[in-house]
Amino acid sequence: MTGSDDKKNPFLMDKDKLEPSALDADEYDRQERARREAMADMEVQIIDSVRDTKSSPVEPVRLTGKDSFCFKCHKGVSCWNECCHDTDITLTPFDILRLSRRLDVKPADFLAIYTYPQMWNRAELPVAKLSMIDAEGKKNPCVFMDAEEGCTVYEDRPVACRYYPLGLASVKMMSDTQTNDFYFLVREKHCKGHEESDEQSVAEFRAGQGVEEYDTKNRGWMEILMKTVSWQILGGPYGQEIDPRTKKMFFMATTDVDAFRRFVFETRFLETYDVDPEFVEHIKTNDEMLLKLAFDWLKNVMFADDTFAMKESVLQKAVAKAREDAGAT
Ligand code: SF4
Ligand code: SF4
């Protein structure tokens, strides 16, 4: 496979069009009113798992960190590597960071070589999926699978691979201030790990797989996906479909830190938004903090959340322009 080719990926942005835009004050008020009215009698309950299985063999049992289950995966199982073929793995923003660093490639090149873009089926937002390519022998192995060695990126494997055979679910009711996670077991026929007698709690399994850091660093992204799913009830945010430009912005900001850094530093972004100068210094080099900024900014742009603020002078200008357009004196 070759390096990046923007034409192949419909979600990559045209750099010339990367300019922050501001809602005018009236439009903002209208959208905020619509949002509050819609939310008033809506109960949000979203279940999510980032590794989809073809046969959906999910045990309908809600597990907490304290619950135990029997499972062990090791090289001696007859199904060794079965789960690394022909499966649907959504890469999270932190997965892409970790894997790009490991392979010493830029995120844009990583995306072009090892992934393909697809709409995340529950939210109509574009995400990067891990490529499973045809090869001789077994069907559609993961690009990182070696028949002898197993996973060649094991220390930096995606969070979906770490969680397996657990699924992660997040629920947020209207009365909740934050999302509540729980887990469920995925029991696929080919997976013999379930026949092993080793018992562990969900918390022990999660700790052993190192998922905590991933969940923390991907939280804002998960929240955007979840909120978008819940908005689908209304036909999209404010009852409107997410426009293609916002989808491209979402894809750029959540998959390619280099592109998002250029967007922040090479457009009027920092003239438009109120970002702490110390934080600005950090995001020049810190990718994780830049991701956090991306999530907060997207929440503001997509849902008018108060995670981000425009500069007072920009707001004043927008209000003045709105008044002028409305013919006020
Ligand atoms: S990244 Fe590793 S663990 Fe995940 S599917 Fe590929 S080979 Fe398997
Ligand atoms: S199918 Fe299950 S037991 Fe077999 S290698 Fe994959 S996770 Fe391990």
Image (cartoon, helix red, strand yellow):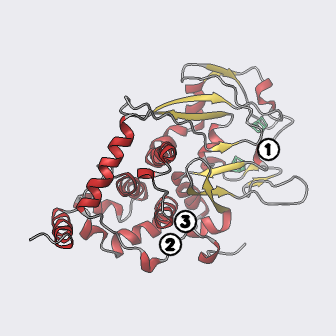
Tags 1 and 2 touching, CB below 8 Å: no
Image location (x, y in percent) of residue 210: 55, 38
Confirm if mark 1 falls within 8 A of ligand 2.
Answer: yes
- Can see residue 58? yes
- In the picture provided, is 299 more to the left or to the right than 235? left
Residue placed at 73% from the left, 29% from the top? 72
Residue placed at 74% from the left, 48% from the top? 87
Mark 2 — residue? 13
Precedes in sequence: disc 1 or disc 2 = 2
- In the picture provided, is 195 more to the left or to the right than 39? right
Q: Name the one closer to the observer, 64 or 31.
A: 31
Q: Is residue 70 above or below residue 229?
A: above
The residues bearing labels 1 and 2 have C-alpha atoms spaced at a distance of: 36 Å
Label 2 crowd (10 A; few <14 / some 14-19 / many >=20): some
The residues bearing labels 3 and 2 have C-alpha atoms spaced at a distance of: 14 Å
Label number found at residue 99: none
Mark 3 — residue? 107
Name which quarter of the figure residue 276 lies in: bottom left
Residue placed at 65% from the left, 56% from the top? 129
Q: Name the one closer to the observer, 77 or 273.
A: 273
Mark 1 — residue? 81
Which of the two discs, 1 and 2, sits closer to the camera? 2
Name the residue type under label 3: Pro
Name the residue type under label 1: Asn
Precedes in sequence: disc 3 or disc 1 = 1
Q: Name the one closer to the observer, 194 or 180.
A: 180
